[in-house]
Image (cartoon, rainbow, N blue to C red):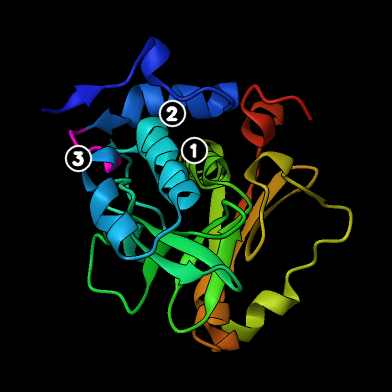
Amino acid sequence: MDLNLHGDAIPSGLTRRARSFLGVHGVRVDVTPVEEHRRFYLERDVPAGQIDRMAAFQERWGGLVLPPAPGYEGGPRYFEADSPEGSTDEGWWFEAGMQRASVPFGFYIGPDDEFGIHAGEWAPLHATIEGWVESLALVYHARLWAQQITKVTGDDVDGIDLDGFEPVREVVGLADTWWRGADTLVAVYSGEAEAMSFPRGRTAYVYSGLDSWGLYGGVDG
């Protein structure tokens, strides 16, 4: 069953912009509770604490369907905790949701609750899953209000002048970052480049001609 999000169905701890985005675009579908697989995971030596972490993710985010992201072939189809892997020494990851398209990486929650992609190498995109949601909400906001959108790829990303820009805090960016200038937002996506050791795989979007609402969308600066 598909359910539109509203009120308490929208996860807490998000900005007003992100909550509005989920209220308009978010849908939640049914997913299997992690508890139904607890014995299966325990028999395969997954620590109980890691299963608890998956269960908490599933309770908060499981089944959430969002519009496509501009990169990573759209991001996860929907959020669903699955397939834990790792060890006590290196930490534990679990799958955060299936891909929308055929891509050479998976979406994971990392040992420190980062959201990222794994393709032989681990590339944490945002320090939290909330950061990914905030970033996606900002994409749709910036697209609506920008007078011009410019896509930059590969080595040309290094040529973007970010002097005088400040990081957009709410996206808690790691491999992927957002920057705010006087009338411009810049999104830099480096996850695929880092996960696949391909520096020229970076992409950036420059959203220019923004007024104060376009820059912040109700989020305090």
Depth check, front residue: 90 or 10? 90
Residues at circles 2 and 1 in contact by the CB criterion of under 8 Å: yes
Residues shaded magenta: 29-34
| 3 or 1: mark nearer the eye | 3
Q: Is residue 30 magenta?
A: yes
Residue 195 at least partly seen: yes
Q: What residue is shown with label 3?
A: 32
Number of marks in the image? 3
* Residue occupying image coordinates x 47% and y 62%: 93
Q: What residue is shown with label 1?
A: 137
Residue 23 position in % (x across, y down): 38, 21
User: How far separated are the C-alphas under marks 2 and 1?
Assistant: 6 Å
* Residue occupying image coordinates x 74% and y 77%: 159
Q: What residue is shown with label 2?
A: 21
* SS under mark 1: helix
Magenta: main secondary structure equals: loop
Q: Is residue 32 magenta?
A: yes
Crowding at dot 2, Cα within 10 Å, few <14 / some 14-19 / many 20+, comes out as many
Give the residue furthest to the right: 164
Q: Is residue 154 above or below residue 25?
A: below
Q: Is residue 172 above or below residue 122?
A: above
Residue 25's quadrant in the figure?
A: top left
Amino acid at dot 1? Ala
Residue 118 left/right relative to 73: right
Residue 151 position in % (x across, y down): 53, 66
* SS under mark 3: loop
Amino acid at dot 2? Phe
| 3 or 2: mark nearer the eye | 3
Mark closest to the chain's N terminus, 3 or 1: 3
Residue 220's quadrant in the figure?
A: top right
User: How far separated are the C-alphas under marks 3 and 1?
Assistant: 26 Å
